[in-house]
Image (cartoon, rainbow, N blue to C red):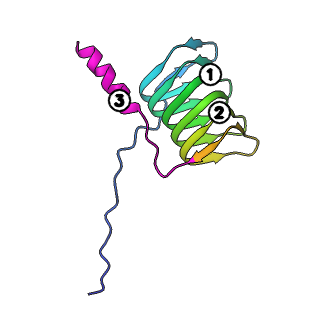
Amino acid sequence: MFRKTPSTPTVSQAPIERVTSVLGPGINWKGDLRGSGGVRIEGSFEGEINIRGLVVIGETGRVSCEMMQANSVIVAGAVKGNITAEKLEIRSTGRVWGDVTTVAFATEEGAFLRGQVRMEERVELDLVEEEKKISDTSAD
């Protein structure tokens, strides 16, 4: 009568959290980065980032963007721009100039953030729409 029903674990469709592409330390890239997978930036990047997956800004990485959107972001280098992510980690060498919207936020001692932090229960990323636009364009 008072038996507790066993709860079934919820299985989420999490994106793969591993790096599949690298922008090396000697590379300067200007443009937009969209898609799914994991990206590590060790060079300099200027443009928009919309990634379904992991974005790592390495210690030598420099990113300048209006908005970065990804499921997970790890910053060990420098980011000038706003970040929207489900998980954000700023390492001790990481520097962020911009506003942050996230569900999970972690920093190491020595990390730098100049901007507002907005913690949400859930973050809506515009990643699905970007993938749909790409598939619609390639179908023509």
* Residues at circles 2 and 3 in contact by the CB criterion of under 8 Å: no
- Residue beneath label 3, please? 129
Check disc 2: other Cα within 10 Å, few if <14, some if 14-19, many if 20+.
Answer: some
Question: Helix, strand, or loop for circle 1?
Answer: strand
Q: Quadrant of residue 62?
A: top right
Which residue occupies the foreground of this view, 43 or 50?
50
What's the residue type where badge 2 is placed?
Gly
Placement of 87 over or under 2, stated as above or below: above
Q: Residue furthest left?
A: 140
Which residue occupies the foreground of this view, 101 or 63?
101
Q: Is residue 72 left or right of residue 94?
A: left
- Assess whether residue 124 is covered by the magenta stretch: yes
Say which quadrant the N terminus sits in: bottom left
- Assess whether residue 51 is covered by the magenta stretch: no
What's the residue type where badge 3 is placed?
Glu
Question: Helix, strand, or loop for circle 3?
Answer: helix
Placement of 20 over or under 28, stated as above or below: below
The Cα atoms of the two marked residues, 1 and 3, are separated by: 23 Å
Check disc 3: other Cα within 10 Å, few if <14, some if 14-19, many if 20+.
Answer: few
Indicate which disc, 1 or 2, sits on the residue closer to the N terminus: 1
Residue 98 has which mark? 2
The Cα atoms of the two marked residues, 1 and 2, are separated by: 10 Å
